[in-house]
Image: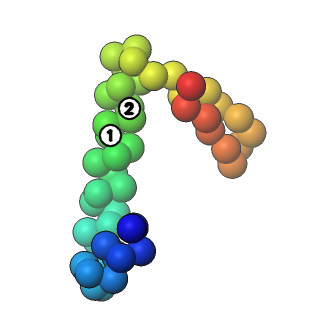
Amino acid sequence: MLREEMEYLGPIKVSDVEAVQQQIVDSVRRLEDAGEIEVAAGNESEQYIT
């Protein structure tokens, strides 16, 4: 299903992808600040959401 949607959308600008990724990060940080989720640090390359 995701693959079909990607094919339907066609090429997407990197700047658009990065903007949406930043929105996701901002949402996760807001949820963490509100105490709704906890982001637990693993090693330097991994983090876990609990």
Viewer-proximal residue among 7 and 16: 7
Q: Residue furthest front?
A: 1
User: Which residue position holds label 1?
Assistant: 26
Q: Residues within 10 Å of mark 1 (few under 14, many from 20)?
A: few
Asked which quadrant contains residue 14, the reply is bottom left
Up-down: is 41 above or below 7?
Answer: above
Identify the residue at horizontal 34%, vertical 16% (top origin). 34
Q: SS for tag 1?
A: helix
Q: Residue furthest top?
A: 35
Residue 42 location (% of width, % of height): 71, 35
Identify the residue at horizontal 39%, vertical 35% (top origin). 28
Mark 1 → mark 2, Cα distance in angstroms = 5 Å
Residue 21 location (% of width, % of height): 36, 55
Up-down: is 13 above or below 41?
Answer: below
Q: Residues within 10 Å of mark 2 (few under 14, many from 20)?
A: some
Badges 1 and 2: C-beta atoms under 8 Å apart?
Answer: yes
Identify the residue at horizontal 62%, vertical 38% (top origin). 47
Residue 9 location (% of width, % of height): 25, 79
Amino acid type shown at disc 2: Arg
Q: SS for tag 2?
A: helix
Asked which quadrant contains residue 7, the reply is bottom left
Asked which quadrant contains residue 6, the reply is bottom left
Residue 29 location (% of width, % of height): 38, 32
For the N terminus, the quadrant is: bottom left
Amino acid type shown at disc 1: Asp
> How many numbered marks, from 0 up?
2
User: Which residue position holds label 2?
Assistant: 29
